[in-house]
Image (spheres, rainbow, N blue to C red):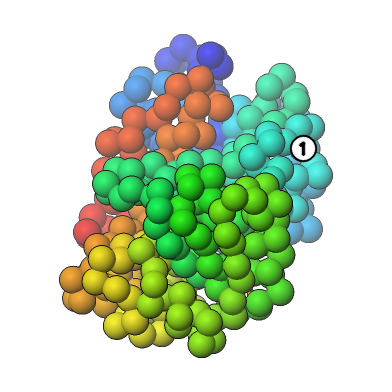
Amino acid sequence: MTQTGPLGSHPRQLGLIGHPVGHSVSPQMHNAAFAQQRMNCQYTAWAVEPASLKDAVAGIRALGILGVNVTIPHKEAVIPLLDEVAPTAAQVGAVNTIVNRGGRLMGYNTDGWGFQSSLEEAGVKLPGLEVVVLGAGGAARAIALGLARSRVARVVISNRTPERAERLAADISALVPEVPVSAVEALSQEERSALIDAGLVVNCTPLGMAGAGAGLSAVSDINLLPQLAVVYDTVYTPQETRLLKEARQRGLRTVGGLGMLVHQGACAWEYWFGRRGPVSVMTEAAKAALGGGA
Ligand code: NAP
C-alpha cells in the first residue's frame, strides 16, 4: 500500500489535470474521503492547457505527486507520455488515472468500472440487453467495451460523426467478436430503429450538460423507447438532465452520471492506495458540491 504520510507531516499530493476543471467536484469528493479516512493527502484540480500537458506530466514525476486523474481533453494525448499503460486503458485508448510508482508513471482507465458499478448499484442486469450508446468519444469507448464484455445482446453506437462510431465498433468487434457491435449516424432512421428495440440507452455526449449542452437531449424522441428501457446519462451537471427528466416523466428507469463519477474515483483509489475509496462519503461530498440537489 502507498504511504500517505503521518498526520502533521506535509500532505501527499494528488489531483486532476484537464481543461477546463473549474466545474469538477473531484477535489471535494476525494478530500472529504481523505478527511474521513484520516489520510494526510490533498487533491487539487489543475487546469492544464493542451500545449502544457508534457510539462504537467513531467511535473508529476519532478514533484513526487502520488496520483492524478485525467479528464477532457487529455485522456488520449497523455498515453505516449506515460511509462506504462494497463491493457484495458490501452484497448480503450484513454487513461483517466495515473499512479506515480517511484517516478514511473502508470496509466489506467476506471471509467468503465465506474459505469458498471453504478449500473449494478441501480440493479440493472446487463446480459442479454440491447444497448444503444450515444457518442463515440473517450467515455463511450470505455463504456461500450465494458458492455460488450458483459455479454449484452448487442451494442449500437450512434454518433454525430459516423466514421468515429464505425472505428469504435470495429475496435470492439476485434476485442469481443462474439457480441454484435454496429455503428449508425446520430438522428438517422437506423438510430430510431435501434432506439425502438433498446433495453438500455447510454448518453456519452455532452448534450444536456450545464453550459453549451444545457437543456438539450441526446435522444430526439423519448417516446421511441420501449417501456422497459433503462436510460443512463453520463452527464451529472445537472444531476437530472433533460434526457433523464423526459425519461422519468415517461415512467422509464433512469440512472444519472454521479454514480459513475463516484465509482471511477473510488476505483482510482485501488491504484493509488491499494484499496477502494469510501463510496458513501464520496457520494455525499459530490452531491453537496453539486448543490445538494437530487
Ligand atoms: P469526447 O471524447 O470529447 O467525446 C464527445 C462525444 O460527444 C463525441 O462522440 C462527440 O461526437 C459527441 N458530441 C459532442 N458534442 C456534440 C453535439 N453538440 N451534438 C452531438 N454529439 C456531440 O468526450 P468524453 O470524454 O467521451 O465525454 C463525453 C461526456 O461524458 C462528457 O460530457 C461527460 O459529461 C461525460 N462523462 C461522464 C463521466 C462520469 O464520471 N459521469 C466520465 C467521463 C465522461 P463527434 O465524434 O461527432 O465529435
Q: Nearer the viewer, residue 53 or 127?
A: 127
Q: Is residue 251 above or below residue 59?
A: below
Pinpoint residue 14: horizontal percent, then vertical percent.
Answer: 55, 34
User: Which element type, helix, strand or loop, lies under badge 1?
Assistant: loop
User: In percent of the image, x 60 and y 56: which residue is there?
Assistant: 141
Q: Quadrant of residue 101?
A: top right
Q: Nearer the viewer, residue 100 or 49?
A: 100
Question: Does 142 sit left or right of 229 as displayed?
Answer: right
Question: Does 215 sit left or right of 14 as displayed?
Answer: left
Q: What amino acid is labelled 1 in the image?
A: Leu
Question: Does 267 sit left or right of 157 as displayed?
Answer: left
Q: Is residue 69 above or below residue 66?
A: below
For the question of whether residue 129 can be seen, the reply is yes
Residue at mark 1? 82
The response on whether ligand 1 sits within 8 Å of label 1 is no
User: In percent of the image, x 57 and y 59: which residue is there?
Assistant: 180
Q: Quadrant of the C terminus?
A: bottom left
Q: Nearer the viewer, residue 86 or 179?
A: 179
For the question of whether residue 261 can be seen, the reply is no
Q: Is residue 212 above or below residue 17?
A: below
Pinpoint residue 29: horizontal percent, then vertical percent.
Answer: 38, 41
**Mark 1 neighbour class, 10 Å CA radius: few under 14, some 14 to 19, many 20 or more:** some
Q: Quadrant of residue 227?
A: bottom left
What count of labels does the image hold? Answer: 1
Q: Nearer the viewer, residue 265 or 113?
A: 113
Pinpoint residue 85: horizontal percent, then vertical percent.
Answer: 72, 36
Pinpoint residue 240: horizontal percent, then vertical percent.
Answer: 29, 67
